[in-house]
Image (spheres, grey):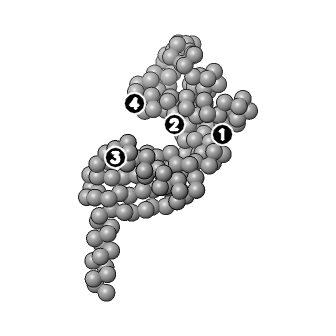
Amino acid sequence: MSAIGTEYGNAIFLLAREQNNLDEVAEALEGCSKLFEEEPMYVDFLATPGIPIEERIGAIGGAFHGRVPDCVSDFICLLTEKGYIRSFSDCQDEFEKQYNLLKNISIAEAYSARELSDDERKKLQTRLEKSTGRRIKLRTRVDETIVGGMIVKIDGRLYDGSLRSRITEILEEMKK
């Protein structure tokens, strides 16, 4: 994470907390982050110094006014004016880190050989919440190198329930 991301992400977190709209800002920042990730040309446009700043700021107003809290559109304007818009995702990551800490939320990344059904996702999330004592925000990914089972990363820990891991354990036991 960049120093800009840490500083500005913490600033928007403190502002949202002061304005008592943390949940709304968290949702808006996450949505903007996904938009910028899916459409990198938007960030390119906002970061282009050859385009007058008034035009770039006007585009932000047109795109976000009334769709996100004012502090979020103001935040995007500030990053654009300062030339830091490419650090938006770092800012959002820092905000999310602070938000999750305050709300007792952990991010769990689950890797499986195939896409999990909604029911499987819910069951996994419930099991993880029971085992950690925290609320879980579950992100799932397909990893075709996993033959079966699942690998979960949460709070810096790796839980390997993959078939490959179990076969390796069995082979190690047989060698003893």
Report helix, strand or loop for mark 4.
Answer: helix
Label of residue 116 in the image = 3
Name the residue tied to disc 1.
10
Report helix, strand or loop for mark 3.
Answer: loop
> Mark 2 is on which residue type?
Ser
The residues tagged by marks 3 and 4 sit, at their Cα atoms, a distance apart of: 23 Å
- Identified at 38% across, 42% down, the residue is 118
- Identified at 30% across, 72% down, the residue is 168
> Of label 1 and label 2, which has the lower sequence position?
1
Name the residue tied to disc 2.
89
- Whole-percent x and y of residue 132? 55, 58
The residues tagged by marks 4 and 1 sit, at their Cα atoms, a distance apart of: 24 Å
Label of residue 72 in the image = none
Q: Pointer 3: residues within 10 angstroms few (<14), some, or many (20+)?
A: some
> Mark 4 is on which residue type?
Glu
Q: Can residue 126 be seen in the rendering of this structure?
A: yes
- Can you tell which quarter of the image residue 19 is in? top right
Q: Pointer 4: residues within 10 angstroms few (<14), some, or many (20+)?
A: few
Between 145 and 80, the one lying in front of the other is: 145
Name the residue tied to disc 4.
38
The residues tagged by marks 1 and 2 sit, at their Cα atoms, a distance apart of: 13 Å
- Whole-percent x and y of residue 35? 45, 28
Report helix, strand or loop for mark 1.
Answer: helix
- Identified at 39% across, 63% down, the residue is 160
Task: Report how many numbered discs are placed on residues in the image.
Answer: 4
> Mark 1 is on which residue type?
Asn
The residues tagged by marks 1 and 3 sit, at their Cα atoms, a distance apart of: 34 Å
> Of label 3 and label 4, which has the lower sequence position?
4
